[in-house]
Each structure stands twice: as C-alpha cells, then as structure tokens.
Amino acid sequence: KPIYVLSGPNLNLLGVREPEIYGHQTLDDVRGLCEARASSLGREVVFRQSNHEGELIDWIQEAREKACALVINPAGYGHTSVAILDALKMVGVPVVECHLSNPASREAFRRETYVSLAATGVVTGFGAASYELAVEAAAGLAR
Ligand code: DQA
C-alpha cells in the first residue's frame, strides 16, 4: 500500500508564496522528492493537495483503506480544524505531521495544531526536506 502525502490550503502556490518563509521549490518539486525518497525505501506515494477542508477529510477517510501511513501538512487548517483532527483519529494508520517552516518560531497562533493530537510525530522547519523526512518516518511506521 502507498504512503498518502496530503497538503492543505495555499500549498499549491509553493515557490511563489512567501518564498523567504517557504522556499523556492514548487509543490511539484516536493512531490518529486517524496516519490524518490519513498521509492528508495520500497514504497510509493499518493501525493495530493487541496484548498478545501472537506476534500482533505475525504482523502483521510480514503486512507483508512488504501494507505499504509499518512503524511499531512495541514497548512492553516492545522491550527483551526477539529474536523480534520476527528478524521485523523479514525484513520487507523500512522500519521506524521509535517510543516515546511517551524511554526513554533513564528506567530503565537501557529504554535498549536489540532493535527498534532493525532500524529505519532511532527517534522517542522526543514523546508521541502521536512516532507522527505516525514515520508521516511512514515515508511518506518507503516503497517
Ligand atoms: C505551514 C505552516 C502553517 O502555519 C501555515 O498556515 C501554512 C504552512 C508550513 O508548512 O510551514 O500554510 O503548514
């Protein structure tokens, strides 16, 4: 089974969006890094992004049956969405949260994410490499 790698709102504009915080790599670049890291570990990824909370929830529910582990960068929804947390609590496969920036070093409202309550671990602050490290961690936890 593949590792699901889900990204939340505004990450479709990665590379253009506040590059001093999020870097110059695009989401397609990040997809390539995740695929390469997964394949070096004998895994595949299903890599998706949505600006819509409900669509992310649909994919988390899909992951219950179809994924061996889940990596999620919930973006802004991490700080607001009880519904995404509730979906993750039911997912039944290991969850690794990841962030490009280090939210703990930014505004106070970024210091907590609901998603962390359902995550085995969190990778933050390494730019695109946060995703690669999260995929590696997920592969190690995969069922
Ligand atoms: C982010 C951090 C969040 O606080 C922010 O809302 C994002 C991106 C990150 O990857 O660093 O959209 O999840």
Image (tube, rainbow, N blue to C red):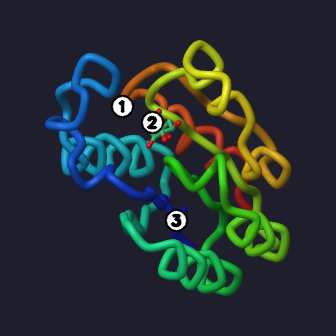
Residues tagged 2 and 3 counted as in contact (Cβ below 8 A): no
Closest to the observer, 117 or 105: 105
The answer to which of marks 3 and 1 sits earlier in the sequence is 3
Residue at 84% over, 68% down: 89
User: Mark 1, residues whose alpha carbon is within 10 Å: few (<14), some, or many (≥20)?
Assistant: many
Residue at 48% over, 61% down: 6
Q: Quadrant of residue 142?
A: bottom right
Q: From the Cβ of disc 3, is ligand 1 less than 8 Å away?
A: no
**Label 2 secondary element:** helix
Q: Quadrant of residue 82?
A: bottom right
Look at the picture and state if 8 lies above or below 122: below
Give the spatial CA distance, label 2 vs label 3: 13 Å
Disc marking residue 128:
1
Q: How many marks?
A: 3
| Residue at the farthest top position | 105
| Lateral position of residue 39 relative to residue 107, left or right | left
Residue at 21% over, 48% down: 13
**Label 3 secondary element:** strand
Q: Position of residue 111 (x, y in %)?
A: 70, 28
Quadrant in which the C terminus appears: bottom right
Give the spatial CA distance, label 3 vs label 1: 16 Å
Residues tagged 1 and 2 counted as in contact (Cβ below 8 A): yes
User: Mark 3, residues whose alpha carbon is within 10 Å: few (<14), some, or many (≥20)?
Assistant: many
Closest to the observer, 39 or 49: 49
What's under tag 3, amino acid-wise?
Tyr
Residue under numbered circle 3: 4
Q: Quadrant of residue 24?
A: top left
Look at the picture and state if 82 lies above or below 33: below
**Label 1 secondary element:** helix
Residue under numbered circle 2: 132
Residues tagged 3 and 1 counted as in contact (Cβ below 8 A): no
